[in-house]
Each structure stands twice: as structure tokens, then as C-alpha cells.
Amino acid sequence: MSQASNESIPERTAHASAQGLQRHVIRNRVSFLEQKIPAYASVLGIVGLLLLWEIICRLGLVPPLFLPAPTLILSDGWEMLSSGELHENILASLSRIIVGYGIGAVSGILIGLILGFSRWADAVLSPVVYSIYPIPKIALLPLIILWLGIGEAPKFTMIALGVFFPVVINTFSGVKNVDPIWIKAAVTFGSSHLNVIRKVILPGALPMIFAGLKLAAGTSLLLLVSAEMIAAQQGIGSMILHYGNLMITTKLMVGVLLLSLLGLLFNRGLQWLERKLLPWK
């Protein structure tokens, strides 16, 4: 009996060592996944790209007319900012995108929630949404101008349409993908329908809603520029078209970089709001 017991000691020791090694590996992997990234890491890629761009231009590998150096673009951008030209165009574009994005996002979330909660609304409205969604919204701009005239209304409408469809589809999908077990558990514990919607369905759908909002941010910038190039006297899109016709590439690139910056700020703002509303994520 003692012999059998003595023979099992090395086996138990080896097994315990293997378990300890496995726990150590898992702990290291978790700590690797949870480690904090320094704040400066977010700008390393952008700084590296700008440096490479500057080097290529300084070496004369690309003619300045086709691709001016970032330093030349910044110099012209500062000149445009000092003269007030850049300020006016930025304010015009920001006012359009804020209004259009706000209208499209709010209406998209509301309609998406209605489609998700009501089978009748789903049956009646979903075919309409999915049939209009694939249409390129810029193709509707001449018709919208014909209906609403030349002014700010067509631009607001274009941006709102581009935002509405990604948001409504993602909101609808988010509501439908909420785990039914959560809803049944809430009902079992006596929650009212309003509380189930407010405390279970909406929090469960928020990740998909934010995915739609982020997707719509890029679409809104695209439609903003398209609308301003066709029917606007001021705005970043109009400025890009103007300097493109004059072949002043540095000032054209100022507008392009501004759009890139706006897209980055949009994305960061939505990420910040998502962290605030979804702390568990």
C-alpha cells in the first residue's frame, strides 16, 4: 500500500507542476491582453506616415504638382487660416454635418427601435428600408435639389439620408439580437414592459447602434463633400473643387487633410461616448 502511495507522489507532483505552469501561462496572456497602451501610440502611425510622405517629396520622387510635401501644405493652410478663408469653410461644413448627422441618427434610431419592437412595422417598413438602402444617395441629389431648391435643405437632406439607413439597420439588428433569456428573466422577476425596453433591450442593442453611428460618420463626410461640390459656394468640398480646378494642389490637400481630421475627431468622439454609455464593454 505504501509502495503504491510512494509511486503516486511523483505523478501528483508532475500534475501539480503542469497545472501551475498552465495557470502561469494563462495569467501572462491575460495580463498581455489587458496591458495599457501608451497615449502616444495612437499618433505613431500618423507621424510615421507624414515623415515618409515628407521624405518622398523632398527626394523629388513625386512631382510637387501631384503630391506636395506636408510642410508646404501646412504653410498654405496657415495662410488660409490667417486670412479667414479656412474658418468660413470649416464652419459652413460643420453646421451642415452636425444638423444632417443629428437628423439622420435620431430618426434612424427611432425607426430602428420601432422595427425591432413591432412585427407589423417590421413587415410593412423593412422591405421599404432595404429596397432604398442600396441606392447611391448622391444619385438622388439632382432630384432633391429639384424638390427643395438650392440652399441648405438639400445638403441637410443628403447627409441625413446617408446616416439614416446604416443607423436604422444596425439598430434593428441590435434589438433583434438581444438574448431572449435576458428578456424572459426580466419578465419573470416582474419588470414592466417599459423597464424591459429601457434596462434590457436598449443596453443590449447599444453596441450595434454605435456600430451604425460609426459607419454613418464616414458616409456623412462623403455625402457632405459631394453635395458641397455640386451645390455650394462655401464649405470644404467647394474649396477642394475650386482649388482643384485651379490646380493649386497644396490648398486642395489642405481640404483633404481637414476631412481626414474631421473623420478622426468624429470617430474619437463616438468612441468616448460609447465608453461612457457602455462601461461594461
Image (cartoon, rainbow, N blue to C red):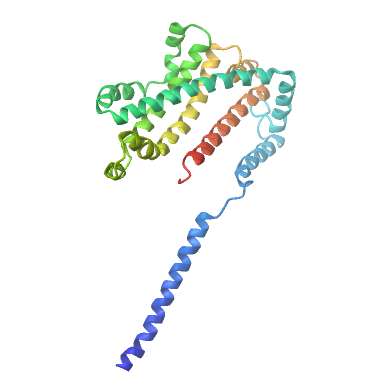
The residue that appears at 51% across and 41% down in the rendered structure is: 275
Q: Residue 268 sits in which quadrant?
A: top right
- In this orientation, does residue 142 appear? yes
Asked if residue 258 lies left or right of residue 202, the reply is: right
- Position of the N terminus, as image quadrant, is bottom left
Q: Position of residue 85 (x, y in %)?
A: 69, 17
The x and y percentages for residue 5 are: 33, 89
Which residue is depicted at the point 39% across and 85% down?
10
Taking 179 as reference, is 207 left or right? right
Q: Quadrant of the C terminus?
A: top left
Q: Nearer the viewer, residue 48 or 132?
A: 132
Q: Quadrant of residue 171?
A: top left
Please indicate whether residue 237 sits to the left or right of residue 68 in the image: left
Q: Judge by depth and name the residue closer to the eye, 6 or 131.
A: 6
**Picture layout, residue 235 above or below residue 210:** above
**Which corner quadrant of the image does residue 57 belong to?**
top right
Determine whether 14 is above or below 181 in the image.
below
Say if residue 163 shows up in the picture.
no
For the point 71% across and 18% down, the residue is: 84
Outermost residue to the bottom: 2
Q: Nearer the viewer, residue 157 or 60?
A: 157
Residue at position x 50%, y 55% in the image: 33
Residue 170 x/y as whole percent: 38, 32
Residue in front for this viewpoint, 187 or 228: 187
Horizontal side of 248 relative to 186 (left or right) equals right
Q: Looking at the image, how many numbered discs can be counted on the residues?
A: 0
Pinpoint residue 248: horizontal percent, then vertical percent. 67, 20
